[in-house]
Amino acid sequence: MFNRITTSIVFLLCSGFLGAQSLPPYNPVTAERLLNPEESNWLMYRGSYDSHGFSTLEQINRDNVKGLVPVWSFSTGLREGHQAPPIVNDGYMYVSTPQNHILAINARTGDLIWRYIRYLPDDLQQFHPTNRGVALFEDRVYLATVDAYLVSLDALTGEVIWEVAVEDYYNGYYMTMAPLVADGKVMVGVSGGELGIRGFVAAYDAMSGEQAWKTFTIPAPGEPGSESWPGDTWKTGGVPVWLTGSFDPELNLAYWGTGNGGPWMGDTRPGDNLYSSSVIALDVTTGELKNHHQYHWNDSWDWDEVSAPLLIDFERDGNTVNGMVHPGRNGYLWFLEREADAINFVDANPYVYQDVFTSIDAVTGRPEYDMSKKPGTGYEASFCPSLWGGKDWPPAAFNPESRLLFIPANDNVCSTMVGEEIQYSPGRSYIGRGTSENGGFFVRPGTNHVGELQAWNVDTGERVWTTTFESQNWGPVLATAGDLIFMGGTNDRYFCAFDADTGEILWQQRTNSGITGVPVTYTLDGKQYVAVQSGWGVDAQREQNLLNMAKGEQHYVPQGGVIWVFALPD
Amino acid sequence: MTGSNKEDLAGKGEIKNTRLSRRTIFKMGLVTGVAVPMSALGQPPARMRPQPGDQLVFEEGPNQDALVRPELLSLEQRPVSAMARDPSTGVLRDGSRLNRVMITRINTEKMSQRYQSNAADGVIAYSAVCTHTGCDVINWDEGRLRMACPCHESQFDIYDGGKVVGGPAPRPLAMLPLELVEGIVTVAAEFRGRVGFTQQF
C-alpha cells in the first residue's frame, strides 16, 4: 500500500461534494454495452469495435452546425500531445493526458470528480509523450502507462484497484494506446520500436489483472515466419503495437496493426520480417495468431502500419466483401477480406504521392520496390511520402450510410534517410539513422499544400472529394449522421466541422493550441455535444520543426492542453 | 530518485492489489507533493551521479572502456558517450542512464566565459539526457556544432553551457565540470543543473 503512494496520487478534490451532487449512479459498462454501444455515449477509443469513429447522432447537422458554441472547457495544466478521446458514460467523462493523468469529469458541469496522477520515474525516456485514451469495463477504468504498466481504477473514485508491469520500461518498452476490452480481458500492445524491443500484445483478466496470454509480433526461432528474421535480429526487431485494435465479435478476432522493424534500415535484418508493417488477427480468448496480411516487407522507411483496419463490408464486382480497410502509412489505401482463417488481399491504390512501390501483386498484394528509393546502411535515399507516411496514427472514420471513408492525409512531403551502423544496448536508441541535409525532410517542389481530408467511396474504390490545407494535418476524424465531419489537426489551431458530402468547412473554432485529439460526440438529457482535446505536440510538432526548416519559416504553435465541449444553444 | 523505480520491476508481472480505503485516498489527496521512495536514501554506488574525483571512461567508439584523455578526442568531434568510474573502488556508475554524459573537445577560448572552468583541456561533458522528455541526446549537427535530440528535435549549444537553441526542451543540458588530473579527464564537481526531464503535475 505504501508503494502505491510512490507511484501515483489520486486527488479527490470534488468527490462527494460538488461532482457527486449532480451525478447519477454509475452505469457499469457491461460486455453487452460494449458490443452494442448506445449513441448517447462514447464508450471506447473509436466509439465501437469496428473502429468506424461514427455516431448516428444527427441533432447537430450541416444545417445548424454554424451555431455551435463552447459549453465548458477544462485546462489540463500539461504540455505535449493531447491525443485521447474524452470517453463518456452517462454523465461521467474520462480524459487521459500526457504524463499519464486521468481526469474524471462531470460531463454536465465540467467539474472535476477525481484526478489520477502517475508518478513517472526520473530515468524514463518518452519518445512519444502522449496517451491515447482509457478503456472502460464494468465499474473500472483502465490506463496503459508510459512506464509500461496497466492500471485498473475504480471509475467512481479513481482508487487504484490493481496495476501490473506489462514490461520493463528500462529496456525501452512503453505504452501510449487506449486498451481494448473484450471477452472479459483488457488487451494492450507495446511501443518502443526505436528502442530495440520485441513487440507483443498481451491480455489481462479485467477483474483480477492476471495475464491471460501474450503474443509476440516477431516469431521466435522455429515458429512460423521465423525464417524471415536472420540470426538474433528477432530479439530486438521492434514491430511495436501502439494503437487500439478493432474487434470482430463474430470471428472472436481482434485485428491489430503492427509497426516497422528495427533498426530502421531493412538491410540490417534481411528478409520479410514477419509480422512487421502488417495487420494480425488474434483470437481474443487464446491470443493465437490466426492470420495476417503484411502491407509491405522489410521496411526501410519507418512506415509503421499500426492503425487498426476499419472493419467495413464493401462491394466489389457485385458481391459484398466481409472486409477491412486501411489507409496505410505507406501511402496506399488497402482493401482486404477478413475470414476466420485468412485475410485476403482485394485491392490497393495510392491515396497520396508515393514513389517507392513499382507494382502490387494482384493476388497477394505484395509490393515490389524501386530499390533506389530504399535507404540502407551507408546508402542515402529519398522517398515519398515522408517517414510519417500518407497517414500516421490519427484515425480515419467511416459513415456506413453514405459509404464514405474519411482519411486525414499528408501529401507532398518526403524524407531522405541514410543508415549508419548501430549496436544494441538495452533501452537506448536503436534506430541506426545517420544525418541528412535539412533534417532529412523536404516538400515536393511545385506543390502548394501538405494536409488533406479525403473522402473515398468504399464500394467504388474512388475518391469523392479532397479538402486541402497548407499546414500538415494531424487530426483524428469523427463522422456523424448529421452529414458532418469533425476534425482539427492543422497548425492554425482550428477545430472544424466539414460537410461530409463536399468537404466544405461549415464551422470552425480557434482553440488554445493545435488539435491532435480524437473528437467524440454524445448526448446528455437528449442534447448532443461534441468534445475534443486541444493540445499540440509530439510528431505534429516535430513535423512543424522540419517544415519551418524546409520553408524558412518560424511558425509557432502554442502548447498546453484544454478539453473543449461544444453544443448548440438551447 | 531514479533507481527505485527500476528496482520496483524486480517483481515484473506481479500484480499489486492496491484497493485502498476511502479514508486513505483522502489522505493521499491532501498530500501536496510526490513522496520520495525510501529506497532512494541508500543508493548503490553504481547508481550515484558522477562524483568529484571520478574518472571518465568511454562508453562507445574505438576507445570503448578506456579512460578519457584529451588527446583521444579531436576538436569539435561528434560527442560520444562516457560514464564515470570511481578510481578507488573501480565501480562504474552505470546503474542509471541519468549518469551518462556526452563528451567532446572544444576550443575553450570560444566558449562562454562562465563555463570555461568546466572544461578540462578543452574536454567538456553534458548530460546525455534531454530535459524535454528524457531521450538520449545522441544526434549531432556538425555544421552548427549543436547536440540534438532524435525524439523531438531539441538542440543544444555546446559552446554556451548546453543552452537550448531549438526545439521544445525547457532547460539547458546539465553540465558536468571536469578537470585534468595526471592527464586523465576527471570529474571536478557534481552536475551543474538538474539532470533529465521534469514531470508536470
Image: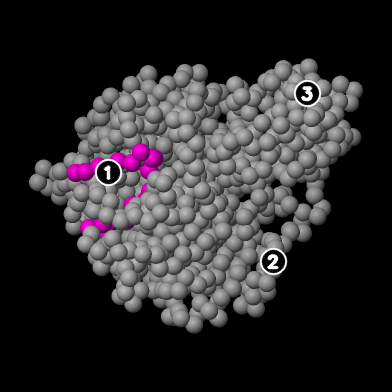
- The percent coordinates of residue A427 (x first, y second) are 61, 40
Q: Is residue A368 above or below residue A400?
A: above
- Residue at the spot of label 3: B108
The answer to if A477 sits in the magenta stretch is yes
Could you tell me how far apart the alpha carbons at marks 2 and 1 are, in whole angstroms? Answer: 48 Å
Per the image, label 3 sits on a secondary structure element best described as helix
In the picture, measured across the screen, residue A565 lies left or right of residue A18, that is left
Q: What percent of the width, then of the height, locates residue A401?
A: 18, 57
Q: How many numbered circles does the render carry? A: 3
Quarter containing the N terminus of chain A? bottom right
Quarter of the image for residue A400 reads bottom left
Q: Chain of mark 3?
A: B
- Do the residues indicated by labels 2 and 1 lie within the same chain of the protein? no
Q: Which residue is mark 1?
A: A467
Tell me the SS state at disc 1: strand
Q: Residue at the spot x=62%, y=59% of the render?
A: B201
- Determine whether label 2 and label 1 are within 8 Å by CB: no
Q: Is residue A148 visible?
A: no
Distance from label 3 to label 1 (Cα)?
A: 54 Å
Q: Which mark is residue B32?
A: 2
